[in-house]
Amino acid sequence: MGWKDLFRSKAATSEAKRNKEIKKQQERLEALPDSTLTDDDCLYRQTLHHGAVPGACAIAFDSVQGLMAVGTKDGHVKVSGKTGVEVLLVPTSHAPVECMAFSQGRGLLAVGTGAGMVYVWDISKQPPRRVRTDEGKPGVDLCGPSPTSLHVPLGSELLFIGTSANSVMFLKLSEAELADNTVTAEELEPDAAEGGEGGTTKDDDVIVCSSQPLAPTNILVGLDGSASRVLAFSLKTRKILRTYIGAPTKGLKAAVWSGDGRWVAAGFEQGKVVVWNAEKEKALFVLDLPQYTGPLLNVGWGPVTEKTDNSKSKEAAKPPVLVALTAAKGDEAACLVPFRSDPPRPVAASRSCVPLCSKAQSRLSSA
């Protein structure tokens, strides 16, 4: 046998081996059952991520499970907290995250985007996945308005959705389905609906909608746009209980019930904090923040301490603390300004500003 014949024989053997291997692979594939995977099942739902995310614009916190979620301008949501929990939720669209809210202790996170969509993530699953609607869609379309605020009452199955159309919608978390009892713009502004000189319009944003502690059928609604308003609305009677007066007419940034539902506080961009008795419309006082702080960002109440029956009851019953978050002038630092009150009353706090970064610390020490 010559050299040419030997090379041809070896090439034919190698080709036969390759054909035999290909045939075996085809037989294995044909033996597999038909796949039920869809295109959506192949989308990324979880991305391991470490460190801070750029473009943060929204935040939510689950105090029961110790989880924090940070939403970004490109639609991503970073969830972190307990050991082993650090995941980046990847969106199907890159609309900015407008607002978020946890269902406390249940592992459900609601995310509202600028595209008029609300997504409910079940982060208790591995990997986290969206709660789908009956039609199989991964999110709920609000059909026009954008979500501007989200709130889940403790232990409730409903998500409160404040919208850019001056309305409050409700979504069933477990089914990702909108309920039928929407609070309309006409109900929140009856004078405007009747042709009167109402303070708000349908183009105003509901920047706050939260249920009253111990009376969840009463909700606090904060409106901002053509004019700022803070009001209490009854879901039972479908009527405004009271409209809180004595506050600035522009720049509402936050409004919140105290932990026992007795007081209401609202913060305005120009640095004013207004406090009301929840049962009365007239403001108790309007408080100007210290002059060295910048625009107000948020307000909140500290926990309520119950009185005890021992001899030191006066010491045990500490008054609640009203906290205002502001931006320091000249940079993007922030500081906390606490005010003790029970009943609420203004307390001088020009030196109780707690800086959250070294820049603010140096500014305050030189002030």
Image: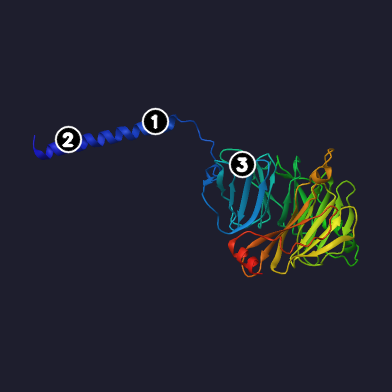
Q: Is residue 270 above or below residue 178?
A: below
Q: Judge left or right: residue 137 versus residue 83.
A: right
Name the residue that disc number 1 marks. 27
Across the whole image, how many numbered discs are drawn on residues?
A: 3
Name the residue that disc number 3 marks. 123
Query: Distance of mark 1 from mark 3, alpha carbons?
Result: 40 Å
Query: Distance of mark 2 from mark 1, alpha carbons?
Result: 27 Å
Q: Which quadrant: the N terminus?
A: top left
- Residue 154, numbered label: none
Q: In the depicted view, which residue is nearer to us: 105 or 190?
A: 105
Considering every residue shown, the one lying at the far top of the view is 31
Name the residue that disc number 2 marks. 9
Amino acid type, mark 2: Ser
SS of the residue under disc 3: loop
Q: In the depicted view, which residue is nearer to us: 261 or 224?
A: 261
Query: Distance of mark 3 from mark 2, alpha carbons?
Result: 61 Å
